[in-house]
Image: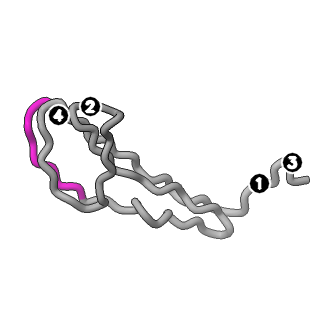
Amino acid sequence: MLIDATVSLITERRVSQPWGLAGGEPGAVGANWLLPGGDESRAERLPDKCTILLKSGDVLRMLTPGGGGWGPSPVKPEDG
């Protein structure tokens, strides 16, 4: 953040995976993180829905969920 700001998060798929269709694999879940002062070692996981006050220098990291797959997964060579 360049200046202090109030941020509201209204996100989905932070706990349950997006489903696949027609035998496809589920997608990955997303995540919301606060890095106070941009410090990776102090990262705090945020809930999917919240309102927080961020200070100048804080970093809000949002990892978006991946979509579920469609159709059967291809056979890997090691699977025979």
CA–CA distance in space, label 4 to label 2: 9 Å
CA–CA distance in space, label 1 to label 3: 12 Å
Q: Which residues are magenta?
A: 1-9
Kindly identify the residue that appears in the image at 42 percent across and 53 percent down: 30
Kindly identify the residue that appears in the image at 68 percent across and 63 percent down: 71
Q: Which mark is residue 25?
A: none
**Disc on the earlier residue, 1 or 2:** 2
Q: Single out the residue that lies furthest toward the bottom.
A: 22
Q: Kindly identify the amino acid type of the residue bearing the numbered disc 3.
A: Glu
CA–CA distance in space, label 4 to label 1: 43 Å
CA–CA distance in space, label 3 to label 2: 42 Å
**Disc on the earlier residue, 4 or 2:** 4
Q: Which residue is mark 4?
A: 1
Q: Residues within 10 Å of mark 2 (few under 14, many from 20)?
A: some
Q: Which residue is mark 1?
A: 74
Kindly identify the residue that appears in the image at 29 percent across and 31 percent down: 39
Q: Kindly identify the amino acid type of the residue bearing the numbered disc 2.
A: Gly
Q: Which mark is residue 38?
A: 2
